[in-house]
Amino acid sequence: MRQHSFLIFVLLFALSLSGHAQRNKKLRYKADKLEFMKIDGQQVRKLTDNVVFTQKTTKIYCDSSYFYPKENRMEAFGKVRIVDDTVVITSRKLTYDGENRKALLREDVVYNNGHQTLYTDFLNYGLDTRIGEFFNGGELIDANNTLTSKVGIYYSLQEYAVFRREVVLVSPEYTLKSDTLNYNTVTKVAVTPGPTEIITPDGVKLDALGGEYLTERKITEFVDGEVETQDYFLEGNELFLNDLEQFYTAKGDVHLTAKARDVIIIGEEGLYYKALGLSKIYGQPVMKKMMQQDTFYLTADTLYAIESPVPEEKRILAYHNVKIFKSDLQGKADSIAYFLSDSIIRLYNDPILWANFSQITADSIGIQLVNNLIDSMILRKNSFIVSEDSMKQFNQIKGRNMVARFDSSRIDNIDVTGNGESIYYLLDEGDSILMGLNKMICSDMKIRFGANNELSNITFYKNPEARLIPPHEIKREDTRLDGFSWRLSEKPDLYEVAYYLKPEDEIKKPPIEVKEVDPSIKPRIQKKKKPDKSEEETKVGGN
């Protein structure tokens, strides 16, 4: 037993000596000139001209060197070059410790491993670990990207790098700035765990709390970020960038905010097509616009915001199941176009509006905003306005086209152009006794209203026909113009449009079918032509 223990001790001691000898393998050298000297009482060998040091697979070249044999350490100067397998490092100064094979390179340091090149003035490099650490600034360049930072650690064996402080990644698609970045030199995947800024060559800016960047595939995923485009800020809990296809995706609490106007669009998901300057928001999207002491809300299956260098082409489009709400205006339509330059909101495909006590329909309706207030409405084809009076009777105006002008959110006057018809109930001053029914037909007419939305007077143009029907002679067919339909039950309320304003336990989110449309569609309304008019005026309502 004692002999067995002794053999184990001898074996372990021999292995220890072998490892120690391996760790302390002396540097070998050669040079054209060799000089022996002492520095601070220590023996030093000074080598000059064609100096070469060798250790394991490592070769070090320099113009001159001091070698400290007792410490197995050398200092090199001039054109310093380290060659180790595929790694080549050059500098102007070097301190190399042969015991731990650690190289401290200074001034004009260039590291190259055949795939990447690192430039710095301060590099500490382990020949065995293949770990390089730079400080006071460094730049790593590969085939596609350039990375700079104040501090960095490059793990050559793991092909991985960590950058700290003032990190900048420049790729053909964008410039990224962060305080920390982890980079895989093989997959070219960069990860930032903290605040990150990205700027593309065409001016799109993105801010996020971190992300993963697949630089070769030109795909990026962000956490809680914001994309700044020419006209908007796009925010989301998750952002996804595909530079190859030129689009961004946002998910979770998506906000699209206009820079120049008080317009915000929220939704569950969003897309930004950079090449088209087009943002798409869906998943119960809601647009809200501040309008003085009120807010204009709009919802639809899908909302689009279109950017353009031409101001007249900047617009917001809403498609399918459109609903709008303002305290004094509610409405529905299949689609809407909001042109930002002229502040006109245009409704298409069975649009219907309710303004106070009036119901407004036409084939298309344009709402003109001035100083964030409704200034006028333009009704094109099959225009129809119905108002309910205090006796629950329906006053009606019908025509081919109409222009309704507003004063402090109430209808002030209406111009009817083509095929004008109207039905108005005449009430006494107390609005409680019916005096008769006034039916009128003419080509054009102008209708004016009083402060309480009551009819003030009507001016007829071109062959007017008017008939006053006494109360006892009024028949059912006299009370309705052709095409009349009272659709008050369809009027949306605030919570139908801005669902998120409900208490949380009342919010219901049914799935919405999103229909794709061509975002290049830009609906327009023809400009009104003023007809020649021959005028005749008739007073109604006893005024």
Image (spheres, rainbow, N blue to C red):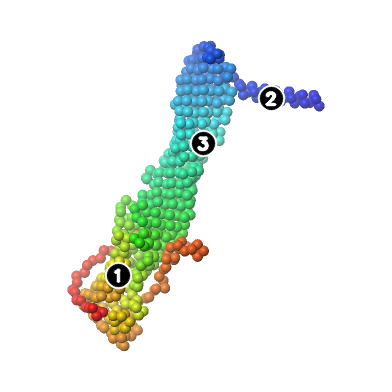
Nearest the eye: 116 or 230: 230
- x and y percentages locating residue 28 in the rendered image: 57, 18
- x and y percentages locating residue 376 in the rendered image: 29, 66
Q: Which residue is mark 1?
A: 411
For marks 1 and 2 on the same chain, the one whose residue lies earlier in the sequence: 2
Q: Which residue is mark 2?
A: 15
Give above or below for 82 relative to 382: above
Give above or below for 377 relative to 391: above
* Spatial CA span between label 2 and label 3: 35 Å
- x and y percentages locating residue 378 in the rendered image: 29, 66
Q: Residue at x 61, y 22 (%)?
A: 24
* Spatial CA span between label 1 and label 3: 68 Å
- Tag 2: residue type? Leu
Q: Which mark is residue 161?
A: 3
For marks 2 and 3 on the same chain, the one whose residue lies earlier in the sequence: 2
Indicate the quadrant where residue 352 lies.
bottom left
